[in-house]
Image: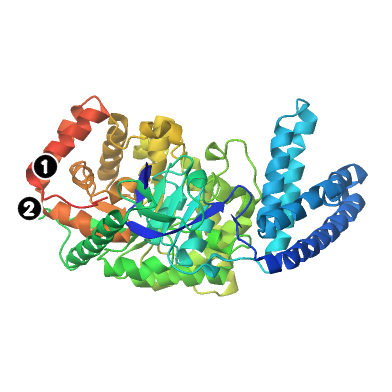
Amino acid sequence: MQTLKGRGVADGIAIGRAVSLQTRIGEIYRFPIAEGDVGAEVERFGEALRITCEEVGNLTRQVGDDLGEELAGIFEAHLLLLQDASFTGRVVDVIESEKVNAEYAVHEVVEELEERFARIDNEYLRERNEDVRDVSRRLLRTLSGFAAHELSEIEGDVVVVADDLTPSEAVHLGRQGVRGFVLEGGGRTSHTTIIARSLNVPLVAGVEGITRLATDEDPVIVEGSSGTVVLHPTPDVLADYTTRRSTLADREAELLATCDLAACTSDGVSVSLLANVDLPEEIEESVRFGAAGVGLYRSEFLYIEKSPEMPSEEEHLDIYRRIVEAAAPYPAVIRTYDLGGRKLAREVMHIEEENPVLGLRGIRLTLARPEAFRTQLRGLFRAALHGDLWVLLPMITTLDEVGQYRDFAAGVMDELAAEGVPFNRDYKLGVMIEVPSAALTADLLARHVDFFAIGTNDLIQYAMAVDRNNEHVADLYQPLHPAVLRMLRSVVEAAARQGIDVEICGEMASDARLAPLLVGLGLRRLSMSPRVIPAVKTRIRELDSHQLSDLARRCLDLETTGAIERELDAFLAERCQPQEAAR
């Protein structure tokens, strides 16, 4: 038995068999091939290679005609690589010697080539590594159309072990019934983690070397709240975790009994607990867990699911209508797409940047790509006929961006009116407070919008200069840092002076431990993963609002994150019942 520790980022316990997934070039599985099927697999590779060569040849001629022979030479080099016997022969050799699927053989050979290029001193030759990656991606795409392997081919309970997963891969695998994820990379606020929580799939991130330690078919346990991974558990350990999993299910059933109770403090101060929604499956789930509306629908996941295609206006309308109707009589907050950063900017919007987190993302990207944005807004304004729609703009850094949005939205409404398409002009407009410039000018922004939504995931990242997905600086990502608490207080006060609503929709709102402090800071709208609503509600009902205000004042006077954590934990230990996995 071997016990490994990582960062528990999506709660729950998963028990199953490991399947190792390499993601550095697309979504690659290593499947064993029976002796009698090796020849057919080589033929499948050969057919994919023929088609890929034909595609690249056509592209070379087209580029030559349109853009000149110099640029066509790039693709001629790609064609030469595809026709190079040392490359293709090596792939065939791997298929035959290791008895594996062609996709994995291509992946393995490409990794070998990339390592050789990386050791070359000549910069020009070293940069030809990109040609290798381009060719491999094209070949793998062709292969995927020929008897592509699916994880569903593997029977039983599966735990995916991977170097990393993109959000789209997490959606794909989660919907195939994967029981748990173990990743070498990732973090608590990554969008892959958010997807795992949305699908109720336990996830442990930051387990270095797990893809080398775990091989296919290894029995594995994933304990998401503590970040524990157990390989080859003994019978006693397996029985213990099976019991724990059953206890968690019983605890969830108990918490569900609170769904009809009011979310208010013991002295009667009401708090709205709303649902963060990423996938259609969560719309009905949010109602079941007692959400007072949808506090955040991240519309970029509609793009992620449709990738590489763009969603149509009718697809936008369909999902937004479902959301506003399910949320009624409460509001539904729908954020315009927040692509960019690491979220499909290159795949969907054809953008490649050296520093995407500080680049063309959020509102910047939507205003720079008006056609895609126009389609989304048409769907939103049509959906506003069916419920209380609140439109939320992401990554706002200046007041000018709000003005540009209003001008663009007015033009879209004029188009709909001219076409005779029914829509509703009456909706609330809000902005995300997720960068320090927005937090520091919240008093100015509050004069021009109807509500704020504080996105603590990015706000903490930008305020602390910490990449939230980088395990090397994970300890510096501190939600209870004095700077973060002071920004929260400042934004709440600015909203109150202007008389507008303010909600918090980052991961801080999903933590029952932090909820009392957030209420003490003056927040009365908390949006979170639907499944944690009962735990947060139970915690809030135990406490008095005056005590929470006093707690917030004491924490704001403290100098370090550690001191604030100790103050909060002492307060909870004295006044609250312990909660299991109340995150």
Residue 416 on image: x %, y %: 56, 68
Local secondary structure at mark 2: loop
**Which residue is labeled 2 in the image?**
267
Q: Are the residues tagged 1 and 2 within 8 Å (C-beta)? A: no
Does residue 28 appear in this view?
Answer: yes
Image vertical order of residue 384 relative to residue 440, above or below: below
Q: Amino acid at mark 2?
A: Asp
Between residue 246 and residue 507, name the one nearer to us: 246
To which quarter of the image does residue 455 belong?
top left
**Which residue is labeled 1 in the image?**
573
Local secondary structure at mark 1: helix
Q: Earlier in the sequence, mark 1 or mark 2?
A: 2
Mark 2 residue crowding within 10 angstroms, few (<14) / some (14–19) / many (20+): few
Whole-angstrom CA distance, mark 1 to mark 2, is: 20 Å
Left or right: 63 as drawn, with respect to 219: right
To which quarter of the image does residue 527 belong?
bottom left
Judged by depth in the image, the label closer to the viewer, 1 or 2, is 1
